[in-house]
Image (cartoon, helix red, strand yellow):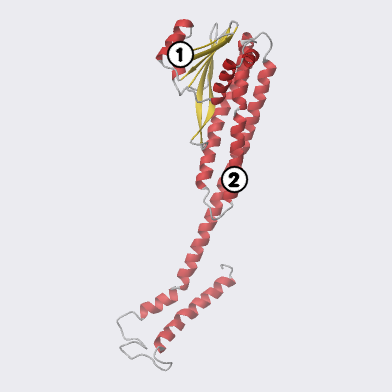
Amino acid sequence: MTAAKIGKIDETSCGSLRWINIEKPGQKELEFLASNYSFHPLALEDCISKIQLPKIDKYRDYIFIILHFPCLKDGGKLVAPSQLSIFLGKNYIITIHQGDIQPLTDLFRRCKEDEQTRGAIICNSVGYTFYRLLDTLVDAFFPILDYVLRELDEIEDIVFDEKVEAVREVTLLRRKIADLRRITFPLKRIVRELARDVNSFSTFDLTPYFEDIQDHIDKVWETLEECKETIEIYKDTDFMLNTEKTNKILAILTIVFTLSIPATVVGTIYGMNINLPGGVETGPWDFLGTYTTLIILLILSIIPALLMLWYFHRVGWI
């Protein structure tokens, strides 16, 4: 068994089987692959591009696969797809990525540093090594799903708390769930195809193993579908609660404004520059004392407001 590292190209092997791992590939890495393997130039170009759709390209001596896997960004607030390019041949597996797929990096490091792990994963066949790699990457979805489910539980408390705004939290979680669904959906189709094609690189039938991976992907998809339905319910609930809160505020302001109408009307009339009963020009009333005119104006303002208040309560508006 041997292990080597040259620049960004890292390698571990068991007998004639080799696993070459390339992080953040550049032109030198492509030249290395082109000079040592007969890969199609278009496949090599796809390895550098970060916007390729998941796919399987079948050639005479090898299979070229592009898959996307989730990476948490910004402290777990966002999920970004990371591209993984894979070449499968008779005695080699080559993985090319940007170095942010942590489960892959950890698995390769264990294979390189631990002889027992290397023997269990690489010494069997290329097809089995690919199965263990894919199984590890799919299983890495579940910790992310657990994190999403915990966020759903936290958002439920925030949504029903009228003192806290939940719009931002709900929006970020909706985006995270949508990103995970976009990453997961192509895996359902591709893994189903790989179950048939990878057997040519294995000494035994790998179909049951890939069916197990397919089952895990289906569980991930079902969980994401439930999360999507739940977050949509929370979004609608938050919108309804905020609308109800806004309506209550508008109702209170409307009632306050309506109750102030009598005082506004009386004040407007007595603010006009014309002779009015109890005004300065005609002489103020004083049969109740110095502030007789003010008292009468207050009574004229308060009585209509009280009548409106009684009517609003009677019809159930307040």
The residue type indicated by label 2 comes to: Glu
Residue 153 seen: yes
Quadrant assignment for the C terminus:
bottom right
Which residue corresponds to the image point at 57% horizontal and 28% vertical from the top-left? 184
| Mark 1 surroundings within 10 Å by alpha-carbon count, few (fewer than 14), some (14 through 19), many (20 or more) | some
Residue mark closest to the camera, 1 vs 2: 2
The percent coordinates of residue 254 (x first, y second) are 48, 66
Q: Is residue 285 left or right of residue 110?
A: left
Q: Is residue 79 left or right of residue 292?
A: right
Residue 188 seen: no
Question: Residue 301 occupies which quadrant of the picture?
Answer: bottom left
Give the spatial CA distance, label 1 vs label 2: 45 Å
Q: How many numbered tags mark residues here?
A: 2
Which residue corresponds to the image point at 54% horizontal and 57% vertical from the top-left? 244
* Nearest the eye: 62 or 92: 92
**Quick one: SS at disc 1?**
helix
**Any mark on residue 44, and which?**
1
The percent coordinates of residue 171 (x first, y second) are 51, 42
Q: Is residue 271 left or right of residue 112?
A: left
The residue type indicated by label 1 comes to: Leu
**Quick one: SS at disc 2?**
helix
State the residue position of label 2: 154
1 and 2 marks in contact (CB < 8 Å): no
**Any mark on residue 29, and which?**
none
Quadrant assignment for the N terminus:
top right
The percent coordinates of residue 217 (x first, y second) are 63, 27
Q: Which residue appears farthest toward the bottom when viewing the image?
A: 287
